[in-house]
Image (cartoon, helix red, strand yellow):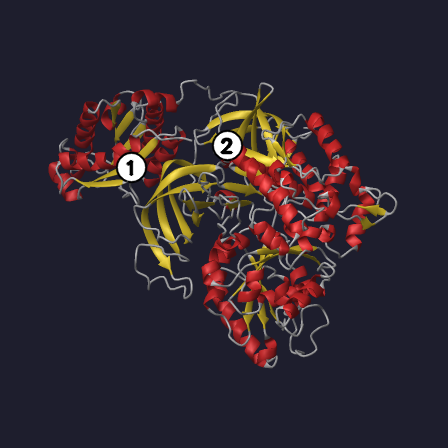
Amino acid sequence: VKIVFVGHVDHGKSTLIGRILEATTSLPEGKIEALRASCKAQGQQFEYAFVLDALAEEQQQNITIDTTQIHFRTAARSYVIIDAPGHEEFLKNMITGAASAEAAIIVIAADEGAREQSRRHGQLLSLLGIRQVLVVVNKMDLVNFSEGAFRKIEEEYRGFLDSIGLAARAFVPVSARDGVNIAEGTNSVMPWSNGPSLLAAIDALEPTGSVAEQPLRFPIQDVYRMDGRRILAGRIESGTLRIGEQLLFSPHHKTARVATIERWPDSAVETAVAGESIGITLREQIFIERGHVASHEADAPIESNRIYARVFWIGAEPLRPGSAYRLKLVTQDVECQVVAVGKVIDAATLDSAATGRDEIRINEVGEVTLQTRAPVVLDNHDRVPALGRFILSDAERLLGGGIVSGAHYPAASSVKSDNIFWSESEITAERRAARNQHRGAVIWLTGLSGAGKSTIARALEKELFRLSMHTYVLDGDNLRHGLNANLGFAPEDRAENIRRVAEVAKLMADAGTVVITSFISPYRNDRARARAIALQAGAEFLEIFVDAPLAVCEERDPKGLYQKARAGKLKGFTGIDAPYEHPEDPEIVVRTHEQTAAQCVDQILGTLLLRLRLTNRR
Amino acid sequence: LNPRHSNLDALENHSVFLLREAHHAFRNMAMPWSMGKDSNVLLWLSLKAFFGKVPYPLLHIDTTYEFPEMIEFREWATKHYGIRVVVKVNTEARARGIGYETHDPVTVTHELKTVALKQALAEHKWDALITGIRRDEDATRAKERYFSPRDADSEWHYKHQPPQFWGQFAIRNAPGEHVRVQPLLDWTEVDIWRYIEREKIPIPQLYFARNGKRYRSLGCQPITHPIESNAATIAEIIAELEATRSSERAGRAQDHYEPHAMQKLRARGFM
């Protein structure tokens, strides 16, 4: 079991770990003697903390610089201790250590109580997804082993942990200096304590629950060509994979069946489970590369180019709207841009209102909206943790980590027959884009009837055509003449209408066209599904809200439909007796009652042209 | 953790994951190979990661003070696994008369290992080296990262190590710099032996007791001392290790020549 020790500086973590190692006879023979000799030579008093602080510099400065991993074993099982430093400037090291832990021990000094770092660390543990926490109240000798002092800290810190969604398994009073209440039977001075000793409390921690029962997520690390076969290599992050079963590969939504599970030197396995680094071969030859994620179609991850997340920031330069970063999520690596910064939380006080600024500074936590250059395969962190976390970096260093939440799982329409497979073209979207000198895309205009969608669609089409781009407008009325002639305006018909439009737009975008769709598309869910469908083709998707007040639209009434609806001659008309759900987070908003059509088109092009440029794939 | 997995499975799977990430990230990588037990585990894991075909060359830094058994093993393994091996000797230092006969072990180790490695790096322009170091070997190694940058002088800036978590890292090498990839960090000495036993990995015979002595750790012949032991099989070695509390590198003279010798060696590019 991997345990991380965190806590405010000088609250006695290292001494505590030294004591644990001694109590479990986990130190190599001669280590303590060597340290005692070394201390004597340097004229220093020996401390148990030196066991960890073996680097010369640390002994001089008396602070732990980096995470150290130390093994120890109790009668019950073996442990790895990750010692994370308490100094604020070393927070990146604390995160490095804590991110791989299964449980955490938070050390609080009895004489000082919870301090800034005690809270900051607690919050980061919560964010990193560590759910098993022990709180050690150390230095009880400094408060005369008083129950009152212990209970006060326990009550206060328990309340804090509650507020960040953590529950401590136990609060354990100890004195690391005097070796009190570390092992069983070493607590004669605190008869009031009815809880376990520290080692007993550690043995009561449970290993992290199995991830084999979660949905299958198999991110591809690489494709190796061996003796004419293509082996997809990767580590199963969650779930179980079996020979013969059908896998869905995201993004791009292609399916193929598992032919073999490869291991060296022998491959005699039928299944592979979470945690295993394996290779597979497929029965159907489809194009797969690093970054693709295999899953089961019934329980697929999300594909999105909008990501909502909580980010902890360790970059020197603050994270700001407009900043661009590399985003890495399992083996995916894409460019992204910060669209918006929401609540920024002061980690020490957990006060979110106080900051009131839209940048996240070093060692802070905040909410962000990110736009990625290409669709990312992800899950909400509470559903599949491994696919719900990512890092942000620049070319040189890791700048922060993020936890995904609030992503929608659209009800994907699955292929009805088991005998239908995706047929692969050798002409990939990349090759088409290279010839066309631009990528395919779906520009989704949404808004009330009369808001100006068709006008803008036609003006945009004309402008793109003038720029020698392949472009086409899918118009609501036009499609209802043919493809969608059998559909009415009931909610389920509207949903099917949008699904078909999205599928057609996806194919056209895959073929390299910049498709402009002009539909009222009043329901958020339908638009989310349209986005998901488009992203399967690896195309850009931009939702553009063509906004104008209802009164303005009604006054324009170019087709006389509002008049009919008001007169009761037209049922289920959006804005009159059917709802329009405003976009929550569209890429672009144009306001046709304030801007001319030309201004709207200019505004759209400003964002669109950048996104249509060829990507430089590695 | 999956109940189906033993601790060894978890370690193996993670090491294989790291080797594949490294192979993707670095275009021109090599793996130093001492033919010692950890080195051979690393080779075995490379065979696992790439399905029997190691895609990078192995590097043997030949100090010219090698045990003859090790050189024999090198020749056998090169053929057996079909691997590409680069052998590097610091001929310039040997020509200057650097040797255990006349110099202290820290100087000799630095010249014949560390400097030789730097020379090989300069000749082959490798951007990454896969090393077999483990956290439990020495306190300074406990601070290491899976992906650890080294500057143009191969120096390790342990105070300014980059953050790494969730299997992710971000490093850009400037020309002349390289990254140490360290897939065995989480393994212990006993893990290594258990894994060798389970996988039946070939290793040099020097590790097994002859006439009441065996080598626990192998380096240059003049400064590597055997321990008292009757452990002639892997099972006996494991039993012996579980009973002992003395440190693995106690028989390696260069570590103990002066206080913090290991840290000084490592900061200057030693593995």
Q: Amino acid at mark 2?
A: Arg
Q: Amino acid at mark 1?
A: Glu
The residue located at (47%, 55%) in the rendering is: A92
Q: Is residue B2 above or below residue A264?
A: below
- The part of the image, by quadrant, that contains residue A615 is top left
What x and y, as percent, mark residue B171? 46, 43
Tag in front: 1 or 2: 2
The residue located at (34%, 36%) in the rendering is: A526
What x and y, as percent, mark residue B218? 73, 44
Query: Residue B1: in sight, yes or no?
Result: no
Tell whether label 2 touches label 1 (CB within 8 Å): no
Instruction: Find disc 1 in the rendering and name its residue.
Output: A543
- The residue carrying pointer 2 sits among few (fewer than 14), some (14 to 19) or many (20 or more) residues within 10 Å by Cα, namely few
Query: Residue A226: in sight, yes or no?
Result: yes
Q: Residue furthest right?
A: B211
Instruction: Find disc 2 in the rendering and name its residue.
Output: B27
What x and y, as percent, mark residue A339? 31, 45
- Per the image, label 2 sits on a secondary structure element best described as loop
The residue located at (72%, 62%) in the rendering is: A24
Q: Is residue A344 above or below residue A409?
A: below
- The part of the image, by quadrant, that contains residue B48 is top right
